[in-house]
Amino acid sequence: MMSTTSYKNKLNQIISFFEWELKACSGTITVYSLLTGVFITVALIISIFVLLLDSPEFSTALPVTIQTFAVASSQIVYYMTGLFTIIYTIKVFTYLHNKRKADLYGALPISRTTLYISKLVSALAFSLVPAMTFLGIISMICVMFGQPIVTEFSIVYGRMLIGTIASITSYGVIAICCGTSVNSVVMFISVNIAYPLSALFIQGVAGSFFVGANIYPLSSSFIMSALCPLSAYSGNHIIYWILFSVICIASGIYLVKKRKAEAAQSSFAYYLPCHIVKVLVSFLFGMFLGTFIASIGVFGGFFGFVIGFVLASVPSFIIAHLIFYKGFSQLIRTSIPLGGLLFVVILVMGLISFDIFGYNKYIPDVDNVVSAGYIENEHCNYGNSADIGKLVKNSAKDFDDNGAINSVLKLHKELLNGVQFNISKKYQGVWINVLKGRFGVVDDWQSFSYKLKNGSVVTRCYDNSMLRHYQKDDYYYNREKGVEENFKKNLLNTKKYVQKYSGIVDLTTDNIRDFEITGQSEYKPNIYDDYYYSSSDSTIKIIRSYGSSAYEEQRKNFANKFFEAYNKDLENDSSDNKTALSMFYNQYNYNSEYSYDYQYYRDFDNYKTYYPDAVCQFTVSINSNNKHKTTGGIINTLLSEIIGHTNEVTLAVPASYTNTIALLRENNIINSDNTINPNTIYNINNY
Amino acid sequence: MIEVRNLTKKFGKLIAVNNFSLNIEKGKVIGLVGSNGSGKSTLLRLLSGVYEPDFGDIFVDGVRLFDNDIAKGECYFVPDFPYFYNNSTIDNTAFLYRRLYPNWSEESFNRFCRIFPIDRKAKIINMSKGMQRQAALILALSTNPHYLLLDEIFDGLDPVVRHLLKRILVEYVSERNTTVIIASHNLRELEDLCDRICLMHQGNMLMEHDIDSLRKQLRKVQVAFNELPLSQDVFAGINIVNLWRNGNIFNITIRGTEEEFMPILNALNPAYISAMPLTLEEVFISEMGGAGYDVNNIL
């Protein structure tokens, strides 16, 4: 007798099972198809009806209507598929959770692995094939109306695909580990909720207790949702979710082979996921209550945290146990992870609450520093894919002259003198970080970095909102005079800094939001003019983010040429040109007592009184691709949609920047007397 | 041939099958009998590949059975509560089995569908317990298994169908040389059907015998005395399995042939003596009593 089955036979077995499952699930698939079909038809009818009512504008309204229909109906398919995926998946894997089904399937002449794969394939196919069919139909409708498939619609395909695969494969593993479908569903939901929230708390603690730590990479990292397969529907971290799914399939195949059939209808076949979920849930509730009690200052903060953590984590552990084990059996024996959790959390929180390692107040000694660097993200343009950690670390080599090093150290010291790391405030800071992380709110940051003599690099990356949270009330009054001025003179107001970190570096027209040039107006006000005391500036706007403008391509070409010429002039400029760079310099005053100067300098007319050789100034607003985004954040997304995030840079063009001035004259933006020509074709206001 | 070697199956602390060994030849009908919870159903689940043994092995025609689809294709297990989906009919279940079982016979399927009075297009879940058993049997017999494992198969069947099933099984075994293993508490039915009986208690095998030799080995003897023999060791030399006394009358279950024990009993001058073979049920009670599982002990 042969003892192995050929792959062809295994494939036949999978197909046989698939067809059988298809018959078993045909009712559910029909319900899904009918409901989705009806919703899509209704969406199409409403779209067409609205379009016909708007008949005078038929030809112009058609593309928008069809695109709206495509996006709306793809969302219908997306959510309906999500709902029915849950139903199919639970149904398909019940064979692991019922003793009588275990008898039926266990005795069938099919290996456990082949059976599991056929179940997985069935669940995936029942979820994805009908959905893809509907999306295909929607695409065909768009094409029939002569409209292209819009990006938002295409993205739904990918999101649904990766989300469904990750969710089903992970549920498969959970179903193998659990003895009942109820436990599987509860565990799947628990891990999908408890993991990301626990990760948020850890991020919150890291951000609040280690104020200079660069936690931004963590915010957008896959780690924040690593065990939350539902977040794969967001379409982020695709490579991680593919890997995750592959690992789930492989571990599912391995575990199902070893799984004891008698585990059906008992609590668990494998206990590890249960321990993980119980610990996660206990951690989450413990952190919630502990942080709450500590943040209102009970028992000085830390001891309040301990009381709150124990008060919430122990009962939640017991409740989770009661749900999973249907009683108290094995409660004591399985409580070792809870003990471990309490010990680790209390120890770690104790150490960091009292800043045992002195992280927050540490500044290297000046004698040990070889070079130093500073970055403030607000005026930078370093691209979407930049590794911030690396950028900050590399900035440690930027300035090796004593003046710059001392300026950075002094500014850093001044900044830390102005804050107070009170324990209660640290716990309050956790909430700020948790909420910011949850809703994807981003803030600006500044970093200090030092290369030490022993070769190591020290970096501190401060979130401005955290600094404000810890700032002493009298911070602005007690600042040492001259620190900021020296810092600007030695660092920010240098050609090297502007060339490396200002927004004009590597700028492309794709990420320009607004671009305008301001100079002296052709119109000369006289003393009898009502407007004499108002500015005689004239601004022409060349690029704007909303709507389309005439001469769009020419504008973009001009912008490219302008930045090329300006960068060339800057490069050729042998000194730290005060006229060019002072505009950039003064942007750093807006949050201080120099705010008046800032306002003053922004007005070109006034600027020219300080720097008479300034011909004009330009301001470029950059789309916020250089801000740290917490992926999928609600507020972040909304803000980007509504107002957008921009970084703004203003620099002046001195008379010595011949390439730039020649270009401006060539394109009739400035006249021969260096006044602004408002009638240029590049002025959006003219169209 | 099925070889069971030192099979042990535990559920937590409970040892359901304990170091169990057995060789089952082809073409035999084996009855698995035993007390409740003795491990009969667990043994069948092990033999059908549903459960994985904790220790020991099962070989079917020399091939290890567990998770081996080819070996399992030669076996068919009808559990005590067969599972059917809500929309399962005999026809649509046959759709899957036809493609999974290598020996599936369309001819047998049609034949058994005719023999058992069941609507093959009706939903099995709506049928009575007995009808569901019959549906399971139709599917089982259509797969033409070399090894048929039946758990409490007579439960819920009416006497006519019971009789029909026994006839079919006997025919089936003689025609196809199929091995049938039946776990049942219905000893009367097993008595008519089985070649061998395997008696289990608390996971252990108490004995395994040909049913004929088992009957020959045990005798139910009633002996009455006018005067009781004075000797304490009155039945010395006789292998007594069970003894019950009512005054001067002794009811004894004796292991051995009449040639062996009658001379000894006659030498005691009994007023009355009679010996007859035991029914399977009496053998069961007697052997279980010997293992400490009798009514007196329980009460």
Image: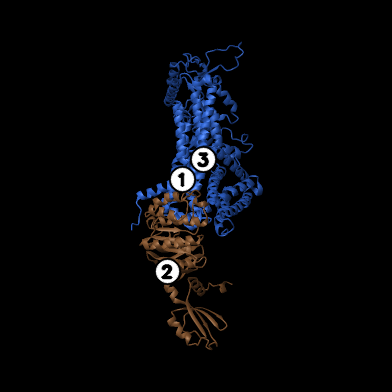
Chain colours: A blue, B brown
Between A461 and A152, the residue placed more toward the observer is: A152
Where is residue B78 shown, x and y percent of the image? 46, 58
Where is residue B160 shown, x and y percent of the image? 48, 61
A655 to A135, vertically: above or below: above
The kind of residue on which mark 1 rests is Lys
- Say what secondary structure mark 3 lies in: helix
B74 to A213, vertically: above or below: below
On the image, numbered disc 1 is attached to which residue?
A: A23
Query: Do the residues indicated by labels 3 and 2 lie within the same chain of the protein?
Result: no
Q: CA distance from mark 3 to mark 1?
A: 14 Å
> Which chain letter goes with mark 2?
B
Residue beneath the point at 56% across and 16% down:
A536
The kind of residue on which mark 3 rests is Val
- Say what secondary structure mark 1 lies in: helix
On the image, numbered disc 2 is attached to which residue?
A: B196
Query: Do the residues indicated by labels 3 and 1 lie within the same chain of the protein?
Result: yes
B236 to A663, vertically: above or below: below
Q: CA distance from mark 3 to mark 2?
A: 54 Å
Q: CA distance from mark 2 to mark 1?
A: 42 Å
**Residue A264 seen anywhere in this rendered image of the structure:** yes
- Say what secondary structure mark 2 lies in: strand
Specify the label residue A31 is tagged with. Answer: 3
Where is residue A65 shown, x and y percent of the image? 51, 26
For the C terminus of chain B, the image quarter is bottom right
> Which chain letter goes with mark 3?
A
A654 to A472, vertically: above or below: above
The kind of residue on which mark 2 rests is Arg
Q: Specify whether A669 is left or right of A532.
A: left
10 Å crowding of disc 2: few (<14), some (14-19), many (20+)? many
